[in-house]
Image (spheres, helix red, strand yellow):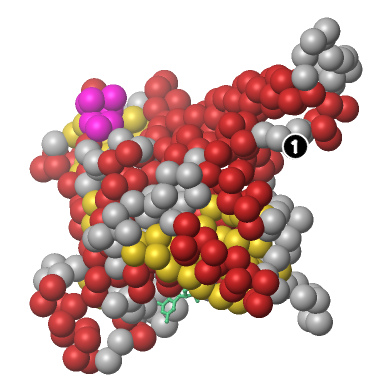
């Protein structure tokens, strides 16, 4: 599947996929199918047919019940489908039985999402994260899939007496998992260093979070004049990007990360843990919502994001909801939204509407983190001045005097202690400056 291209060259035949879903009570069929179709489209698959079965839970052996399975067989041959896409996570044995019985490749929702991630991974870290997630998915499903890995390490492929090919393959895959985890751990160390540098700078940090395709990257670009790629497909962004913007003389950092989805495969949550943690070091999470979605879908996406945020341990962070894509709504729909979400800003990352208000609201949130102080830094403590500049604290005024440098600066509240010996009471400052 990973060889599939998301955008087939003109004239090339896209893969033909047949969608199969079991709807348990409580699931909204239109919603479910809509999302599965979107996933298929993003993966470069043309959906050529659909079969839906309503039952309490999928069949434990073959996902679909007997009758439906027969129906599917007929429909498959008529539709000339290359593969079957199942809207759920299949047990390895279920998948095997289905493949054997249908004589077609069967792809479950998890694998479809993993494929999309594989197609979209750009950075070295992103690629390792996806490979790890794929291996963990494939390990219990292996049927001699891993021959190509044998050549990776000298002697790894040599088989012990009595060991089957499959066992050898599993052993190689497990070693690769260990290796990938180690490499990711190293990369994570580097990321921590960068993150700590950012923390030291005390610059307020905003993390963009939200369902996939809601416009997070568009918003990052609009707020910070960045050029992160934006596309109308799922999981366009996998690597975190941090950019800054200035508002009234202060600098703010904005981080854009991977989008969320309902029932995010747990292999991906593990693989992308480090990336998702970028969200955790933020001072505030901006939860971006696609306001152009129908009401129910809007609610499920908000819930899904809240669930993932809880799963990665971000529930303690302050979250600010923001409704994006309001340019796609008529005035009535916007009023209804305003009633449903009274305090929430309505913006258009694409058109620019509401962005000034958003910047102002973010700034307001961080307002108490800075205080305007006057410091007298003697020349013999010259390094303190450098430290002050390193904080990125906006400097209002600076006067070089005989006894040191007099500075008026917006000092981050947390740094007050470090600079306490140099603080000058405001009233004195005016008279001092004349000295
Ligand atoms: N009408 C409208 N479309 C928007 C707006 N913001 C983003 N979009 C469109 O929504 C699609 C997805 O935008 P992205 O910025 O890539 O979304 P994302 O949340 O970063 O998506 P992933 O990285 O794939 O999770 C693109 O086609 C954008 O042009 C907006 O304010 N209004
Ligand atoms: Mg994006």
Please tell me in which quadrant of the rendered image residue 176 appears: top right
- Residue 247: x percent and y percent? 34, 62
- Residue 11: x percent and y percent? 81, 82
Left or right, 190 with respect to 169, comes to left
Question: Is residue 113 at least partly visible in the picture?
Answer: no
Left or right, 421 with respect to 386, comes to left
- Quadrant containing the C terminus is top left
Decide whether residue 166 is among the magenta residues: no
Left or right, 247 with respect to 215, comes to left
Q: Residue at x 24, y 65 (%)?
A: 299
- Quadrant containing the N terminus is bottom right
Tell me the residue that label 1 is attached to: 145
Q: Residue at x 35, y 85 (%)?
A: 327
Which element type, helix, strand or loop, lies under badge 1? loop
Please tell me in which quadrant of the rendered image residue 386 appears: top left
Question: Is residue 150 at least partly visible in the picture?
Answer: yes
């Amino acid at each position: 599947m990973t060889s599939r291209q998301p955008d087939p060259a003109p004239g090339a035949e896209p893969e033909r996929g047949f969608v199969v879903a079991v709807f348990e009570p409580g699931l909204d069929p239109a919603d479910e199918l809509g999302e599965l179709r979107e996933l298929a489209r993003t993966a470069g698959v043309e959906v050529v047919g659909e079969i839906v079965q309503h039952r309490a839970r999928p069949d434990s052996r073959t996902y679909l019940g007997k009758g439906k399975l027969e129906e599917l067989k007929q429909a498959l041959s008529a539709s000339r489908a290359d593969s079957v896409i199942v809207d759920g996570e299949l047990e390895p044995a279920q998948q095997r039985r289905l493949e054997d019985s249908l004589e077609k490749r069967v792809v479950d929702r998890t694998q479809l999402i993993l494929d999309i991630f594989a197609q979209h991974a750009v950075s070295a870290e992103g690629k390792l994260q996806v490979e790890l997630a794929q291996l963990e998915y494939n390990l219990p499903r292996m049927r001699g899939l891993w021959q190509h890995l044998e050549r990776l390490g000298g002697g790894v492929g040599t088989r012990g007496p009595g060991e089957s090919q499959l066992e050898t393959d599993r052993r190689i895959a497990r070693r690769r998992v260990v290796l990938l985890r180690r490499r990711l751990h190293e990369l994570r160390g580097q990321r921590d260093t960068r993150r700590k540098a950012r923390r030291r700078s005390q610059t307020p940090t905003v993390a963009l979070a939200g369902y996939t395709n809601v416009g997070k990257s568009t918003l990052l670009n609009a707020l910070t004049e960045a050029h992160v790629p934006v596309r109308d497909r799922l999981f366009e962004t996998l690597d975190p990007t941090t950019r800054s913007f200035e508002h009234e003389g202060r600098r703010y950092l904005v981080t854009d990360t991977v989008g969320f989805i309902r029932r995010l495969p747990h292999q991906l949550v593990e693989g992308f843990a480090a990336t998702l943690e970028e969200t955790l070091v933020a001072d505030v999470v901006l939860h971006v919502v696609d306001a152009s979605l129908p009401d129910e879908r809007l609610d499920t996406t908000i819930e899904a994001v809240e669930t993932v945020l809880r799963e990665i341990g971000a529930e303690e962070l302050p979250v600010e909801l923001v409704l994006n894509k309001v340019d796609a709504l008529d005035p009535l729909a916007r009023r209804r939204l305003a009633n449903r979400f009274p305090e929430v800003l309505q913006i258009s990352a694409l058109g620019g509407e509401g962005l000034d208000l958003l910047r102002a609201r973010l700034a307001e949130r961080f307002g108490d983190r800075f205080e305007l102080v006057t410091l007298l830094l003697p020349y013999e403590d010259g390094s303190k001045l450098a430290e002050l500049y390193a904080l990125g604290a906006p400097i209002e005024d600076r006067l070089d005097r005989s006894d040191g440098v007099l500075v008026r600066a917006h000092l981050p509240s947390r740094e007050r202690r470090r600079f306490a010996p140099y603080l000058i009471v405001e009233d004195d400052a005016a008279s001092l400056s004349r000295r």
